[in-house]
Image (spheres, rainbow, N blue to C red):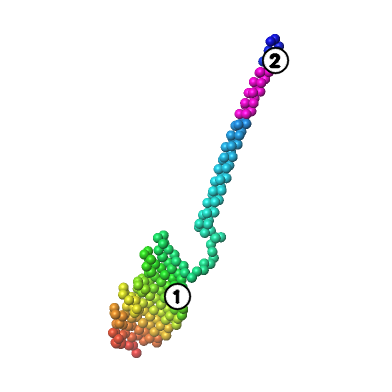
Amino acid sequence: MDQPALYTILRKLDRLEREHRRGKRTLARRLDRLEQESRRLKRLGAAWLGGIAVVALGGIAVVALGGPRTLPKVIEAERVVLRDARGLARVGLGIAPDDRAGLVLYDRDARPLAALQVSPDGSTGLALGVRDGSGRAVLTVETDGSAQLGLSDAGDADPPRAWLRVRSDGLRELGLADRNGRERALIAVAPAGAPSLTLSGETVFRAP
């Protein structure tokens, strides 16, 4: 092979080498750009998924908390019972078979302790310290306006052991009874204002 031909081959090889190096650099730059783009897309994807998660969790929270748009304005039912985490009734609201409307509060053992009721005739009652269907303290208001507060011991609440009564005709009474329910003492004030005292059924004092 003559020298000019050799030079030609060497120049071609050098050109190919330079082109190869340029191609490698170009490929490296392209790969670097692709890697940077991939990292950017991953960050954008993570941010996007995070935003979706926040929106989703926010929606769940709104539903779980009952947002303003999901709260019903009216709840209609014949009976409502609120239970604690153990499933025991703690609050009862409803209409009894005899048409009395009532609210009952229970202790932690689901025993009724307080009750508020409205009877069909319009009279109302509040019983506190309820045991076996009777209240230790019972406030009643009749349809004619008469009101009475009765206090009982651990036994039967009817009749009460002590009572304060204001009748619609203006008579006011404070009475005490024994454990058998017999009236033992009664202080009364007539509508006109005259007081009286009765002991064991006998009036011992009456103002003129």
Q: Which mark is residue 8?
A: 2
Q: Position of residue 190 (x, y in %)?
A: 38, 86
Q: Position of residue 158 (x, y in %)?
A: 34, 78
Residue at image coords 42%, 81%: 146
Q: Which mark is residue 97?
A: 1
Highlighted magenta segment, given as a residue range: 11-28
Q: Which mark is residue 85?
A: none
- Quarter of the image for residue 59 reads bottom right
Q: In which quadrant will I find the N terminus?
A: top right
At label 1, counting other C-alpha atoms closer than 10 Å, the crowd grade (few under 14, some 14-19, many 20 or more) is: few
Q: In the rendered image, is residue 185 in sight?
A: no
154 falls in the magenta region: no
Type of residue at label 1? Pro
Q: Position of residue 112 (x, y in %)?
A: 38, 69
Type of residue at label 2? Thr
Q: Which residue is most to the top? A: 2
Residue at image coords 62%, 26%: 24
Asked whether 11 or 121 is in front, the reply is 11
Say above or below: 27 vs 162.
Answer: above
- Please identify the dominant SS of the magenta region: helix
Say above or below: 76 vs 45.
Answer: below
At label 2, counting other C-alpha atoms closer than 10 Å, the crowd grade (few under 14, some 14-19, many 20 or more) is: few
Is 137 left, or right, of 9 in this rendering?
left
Say above or below: 29 vs 201.
Answer: above
Say above or below: 66 vs 19.
Answer: below
At mark 2, the secondary structure is helix
